[in-house]
Each structure stands twice: as C-alpha cells, then as structure tokens.
Amino acid sequence: GQNIDQPTEMTATEGAIVQINCTYQTSGFNGLFWYQQHAGEAPTFLSYNVLDGLEEKGRFSSFLSRSKGYSYLLLKELQMKDSASYLCAVRDSNYQLIWGAGTKLIIKP
Amino acid sequence: IAGITQAPTSQILAAGRRMTLRCTQDMRHNAMYWYRQDLGLGLRLIHYSNTAGTTGKGEVPDGYSVSRANTDDFPLTLASAVPSQTSVYFCASSGSHEATDTQYFGPGTRLTVL
C-alpha cells in the first residue's frame, strides 16, 4: 500500500527553527509537495521537490532524498502566523497526489 | 471570481437526501479534483477530471458522482447521503493532471449528514 508518515503535532518557540519530517512509500514517484493549512482554511502550496537536495524559498526550505523516501520542511525565524498544519504529499506513478495526515505546528511566544 | 469558489460553505443534510456541491474555477485549468478531509486522515481523492468531458475515480469514489460539462465547473453529487459522508470537501484545480503543476484549492464545504 501507499503510505505517507508525518508527526502528528510539534511545538516550537517564536523566532526559532523547526524541521518537519515526512517519510513515504508510494508506487512510483513524480514529485513531493508541501502545503500549509491554517485551521478552517484551504491548503496553500509551499514547495515542490522532484530532485534530491534542498530547495530554499525565503524562511522556508524543503529537502528531498528519493533513495531514503524522505523529505523535510524547515521553517526558520518562526512567527506566530506559522501556526498551522503542514501537509506532505507525493505524486505517484498515476500522477495522483497521496497525502499525509499533516503535522500541526504550535508556535509559543 | 478569482481562483476557485465552492458552494455552499457549509450544509447540514438529512441522511438519504441528495446533495450537489458546486465548484467553479476561472483559471482555465484543465484538471480538477474533489477531496475529502477527515480528522486524523490525509486528504483523500474522490474523483478527478483531466479535462472537460472526462472524469476518473480516485481513492474513495463510492457514493459520489461527478460531471465535467465545461472547463470551469466540476460539481460533486451525493445521490443518497449517509453519516459517513460527514466531512470537509475541497475542490482543487491544476493546469494539467500529468505535469508538475501545483494544485490550487477552493475554500471548502463543511458537510454534516445526520
């Protein structure tokens, strides 16, 4: 079966750095996405990785290792507005997105 | 209209009733999708459409049907609602189904079936 694993919840302090991990087992791989979802709102796109390595976009970076079936999202200089759920999704061999359950990130002052 | 809109925002429905959730996009995207999101689970694909006139089944299609008569609209119908269909439903679209295109999501419909 196909499986995406992420921690259920994480807590971090404002101004700090947090790393959210995602491991996957899917039938085929055509890219990995990270989305942010604030409570009661729609998911919004953060990043996309298809090749191994780090993609940096402002305070957010995303890393991919295809051989390990592993990715992480790194958030720097945390702000209170970063409190949200972070969803990892893998596009499989049928080009369908398989979603993890999401990691709820709580930021404390 | 800017992006993707969904209607209604929320609905309480009696079991056995028929319900259509509406989704409209103005980005001229070819591909559209319907997901449901339940607590503790990832988004699950119900149905999708690669282009107007075609539809396909996702991971959890039973009890749902869709149509894609034109590029902009992708309604989702529950023929006879059951309590297990209580969920938040998101419509999404992307430029194409097979490319690296990002999926963009509507605001969601919160459906409660009693």
Image (spheres, coloured by chain):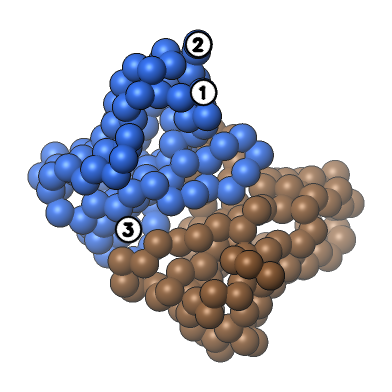
For numbered disc 1, what is the local secondary structure? helix
Which corner quadrant holds the C terminus of chain B? top right
Q: Residue B60 or B51: which is nearer the viewer?
A: B51
On residue A109, the disc is: 2
Residue B49 in view, yes or no: no
Q: Residue at x 31, y 66 (%)?
A: B100
Please state the chain letter of the residue tagged with numbered disc 2 in the rendered image.
A
The alpha-carbon separation of the residues under discs 2 and 3 comes to 36 Å
Comparing labels 2 and 3, the label whose residue is closer to the camera: 2
Comparing labels 3 and 1, the label whose residue is closer to the camera: 1
Give the chain coloured brown: B
Determine the colour of chain A. blue
Type of amino acid at the residue the image marks with label 2:
Pro
Please state the chain letter of the residue tagged with numbered disc 3 in the rendered image.
A
The part of the image, by quadrant, that contains residue A31 is bottom left
Q: Which residue is mark 3?
A: A91
Residue B32 in view, yes or no: yes
How far from the left and from the top, in percent, is residue A68?
14, 39
> Are dots 2 and 3 on a single chain?
yes
